[in-house]
Amino acid sequence: MITKTSEKTSNNFATNTPVKVAVGMGDGIGPEIMKATLKILKAAGAAIEPEFIELGEKVYLAGNTSGIDSHAWDVINKNKVILKAPITTPQGKGFKSMNVTLRKSLGLFANVRPVTALHPFVPTNFPNMDVVIIRENEEDLYAGIEHRQTQDVYQCLKLITRPGCERIIRYAFEYAKAFDRKKVTCMVKDNIMKITDGLFHKVFDEIALDYPHIKSETQIIDIGSARLAAKPNDYDVIVTANLYGDIISDIAAEIAGSVGMCGSANIGKNVAMFEAIHGSAPDIAGKGIANPSGLLNAAIAMLAHIGQAEIADNVKNALLATLEKGYHTADIYQKDSSLALVNTQEFADKVIENLGEMPQNLRRSTLSTGKGTITIPDYIRKKEKKHLVGVDVFIDWDGKDPNILGDALTQLNSYRLKLKMITNRGVKVYPEGLKETYCTDHWRCRFVGVDVKIENKEPQYAQIEFEQVVALLSKLYNEQFDVIKTENLYTFNGERSFSLGQGE
Ligand code: NAD
């Protein structure tokens, strides 16, 4: 679990005065599990002062499409720590994901999800599983920049930034160092996305050099996910981009048997938010039978974050002892091995009864032995030489023969820019495409300055002026080509910074 993770610029929490925490009771089972969690924290002597905020369904239905009202923002900005029960996102268009809004608005760049097996109390095929997934939380395909570009083609922009990569990867290594973890595995798909995932991999290799005592490795996300599902014991800390992290953290929680038991931390430089990973479970809401362990685990991470790691250990050990003794809520109850089926409040009371006890079989919580504070240095932007060397012009055209389009574009008087190639869905179709390639109405037409191709070497791209691009676009417009967007082609410090078309 997260501990002592006050970031360089985060709050310093005094341990003797109660820390004010913004608490969202949530929807569905949210209020039931939050009441149980707060009762346990109070009994354990956690020095926190909840300030309740309205989040979720009620706010959505009152007409606020973000699910958060202005009072809640004020409390969050003041307190910097949020403990949040799951909320219900109403079905239908127009409602924004409140979680995504909170993560992005508050700069919660790291999603930290520890997944530990609780076998045999929570059955799993992997009794020794103990993995922490650190997922980048703000970028990637979750930037939310999507467009329909032609009648047939839709696009989602994947944004990966150097500061984003540096922050999350540094965080993963610092986490491993603080919690005495031995290995950090980076998962990417840079055999395909050589520029975006390639950057993540490159930054990982750079930062790994600063941690010679921590083993580092990189795996392609597809085989990495498969291996994680088959041999989770081979993993320790995993760091990855937003979408991959979203998927593998659910795989990990599922194979540990503990989707209902996991908590997660969303960490930013100034604010941190703690929540269970499950949703508001409308099917059992109001029955008082939900398992509060996921939210309690999130609260334990929160206590460690605000400098109350000893209390966090006490609560965690009491939770483990309760599970070991066989007091189980319906979701994990097993007739043969459980001692008693308990409801939410009875479970909370059992945890309170067990405060001060240690688990006998499950591994004890050792958050208070975490070494030091995680500090993420400020990003230093190095100046690079950027040169414009061409432009990809995207054209909406419902013809089928790329040669007709290619020949027409080649014949344009294009201001010292020449058509280099045309691709359709990334595959080169002109010049010399294959007639088997299926073409849609979305054509990427690459114009470059004069390039010199040397045998077996990258082409050398000549620098061009933006004026040439403007003139080309004007010409295309006059010739009635339907230009839907352009993407400039640059070199940075002489290095090509755009992908080649497949087959180019
Ligand atoms: P869910 O996680 O709420 O429920 C899936 C299944 O798990 C249900 O059968 C439920 O009864 C069970 N379950 C979940 N938590 C449990 C617990 N603590 N104890 C016992 N059983 C539990 O997923 P869903 O049904 O897909 O989503 C319901 C709502 O929650 C949706 O509106 C969704 O948008 C929202 N949601 C919110 C969050 C969040 O606020 N962080 C996360 C996921 C889903």
Image (tube, helix red, strand yellow):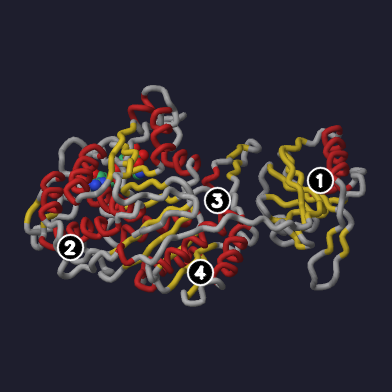
Identify which amino acid the numbered label 3 is placed on. Answer: Asp
At 41% from the left edge and 69% from the top edge, which residue is drawn?
Answer: 227
Residue of label 4:
219
Mark 1 near mark 2, Cβ–Cβ under 8 Å?
no
Q: Quadrant of residue 50?
A: top left
- Which of pointers 2 and 4 lies earlier in the amino acid sequence? 2
Q: Residues within 10 Å of mark 3 (few under 14, many from 20)?
A: many
Q: Is residue 152 at least partly visible in the picture? A: yes
Using the image as rendered, state which of residue 240 and residue 371 is in the foreground. 371
Instruction: Looking at the image, tell me whether mark 4 or mark 3 is earlier in sequence order.
Output: 3
Gap in Å between the C-alphas at discs 3 and 1? 36 Å
Q: Is residue 226 visible?
A: no
Vertical order, 49 against 203 (above or below): above
Q: Which image quarter has ligand 1?
A: top left
User: Secondary structure beneath disc 1?
Assistant: helix
- In primary-sequence order, the first of circles 3 and 1 is 3
Horizontal arrangement in the rendering, residue 149 relative to residue 222 (left or right): right
Q: Is mark 4 within 8 Å of ligand 1?
A: no
Q: Secondary structure at mark 2?
A: loop
Of labels 1 and 4, earlier in sequence is 4
| Location of residue 204 with respect to 36 vertically, above or below | below
Give the mark nearest the N terminus, 1 or 2. Answer: 2
**Left or right: 312 in relation to 359:** right
Of the two numbered discs 3 and 2 on the same chain, state the one appearing first in sequence: 2
Label 1: which residue?
404
Q: Residue at x 24, y 56 (%)?
A: 311
Q: Along the horizontal axis of the image, is 18 left or right of 270?
A: left
**Label 1, label 4: how far apart the Cα atoms are:** 43 Å
Say which of marks 3 and 1 sits in front. Answer: 3
**Residue 279's quadrant in the figure?**
top left
Q: Which residue is mark 2?
A: 121
Q: Residue 203's spot in the image, x, y percent?
A: 59, 64
